Image (cartoon, grey):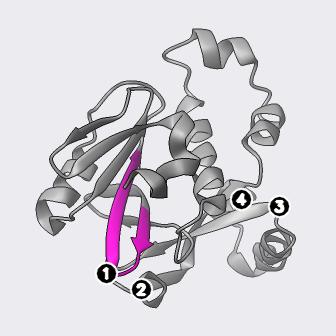
Amino acid sequence: MYTALKTGGRAREFEEAVEWLVSAGMLNRAYNISKAEHPLPAFDKLDCFKLYMLDTGLLKYMAGVDNKGIILSSDFQFKGQLAENYVLQQLQNAEGLNVSPRYYADKTGEIDFILQKGMEIIPVEVKAGKEKNAASFKKFIAKNNPEIAIRFSEMGYVKDGAVTNVPLYLADRLYDLI
């Protein structure tokens, strides 16, 4: 949303700067996809994407977040964004990733990340705490019936049908676990 950067902001004002930051490796881009099907890049909405910082520590610092807020406060509002940025950062560097992570959003909800492993499409939900409530994730799984679905959270490693909960600290080892 370019209007969040500047009132009345348009893509043409910021696209060169965004491209430069992505090319320089300072930002990671995740495209929204119109369909969660193989091959993911074929369904990229090139005008709809999210940007993530190269490093979650830098994001935390730039946002002015104190470590006590993250560690001691379970209702810390920025915790979810930090967790999502952290997971993307780890997935970008994980072995076994065929293409960069995407995300899926439509009128009914959003899936944090969509991964492709071979021909398999894997939905990913990121939770900063131990909560399991993720209506969009559950609806996506019911509709698309993936063989594997991943939830990253503070909970331990738990497999429940197609959904595997992976602790946040193991995000970089995802492909060893599935």
Q: Secondary structure at mark 4?
A: loop
Q: Identify residue for label 2.
A: 43
The answer to whether residue 148 is above or below residue 30 is above
Q: Secondary structure at mark 1?
A: loop
- Return the disc, 1 or 4, that comes first in the chain's sequence: 4
Q: CA distance from mark 1 to mark 4?
A: 36 Å
Q: CA distance from mark 3 to mark 2?
A: 25 Å
Q: CA distance from mark 3 to mark 1?
A: 29 Å
Q: Cβ–Cβ below 8 Å for labels 1 and 2? A: yes
Q: Identify residue for label 1.
A: 37
Q: Identify residue for label 3.
A: 26
Q: CA distance from mark 4 to mark 2?
A: 30 Å
Residue at horizontal 44 percent and vertical 90 percent from the top: 42
Q: Residues within 10 Å of mark 2 (few under 14, many from 20)?
A: some
Q: CA distance from mark 4 to mark 3?
A: 25 Å
Where does the magenta region start and end? 114-125
Q: Residues within 10 Å of mark 3 (few under 14, many from 20)?
A: some
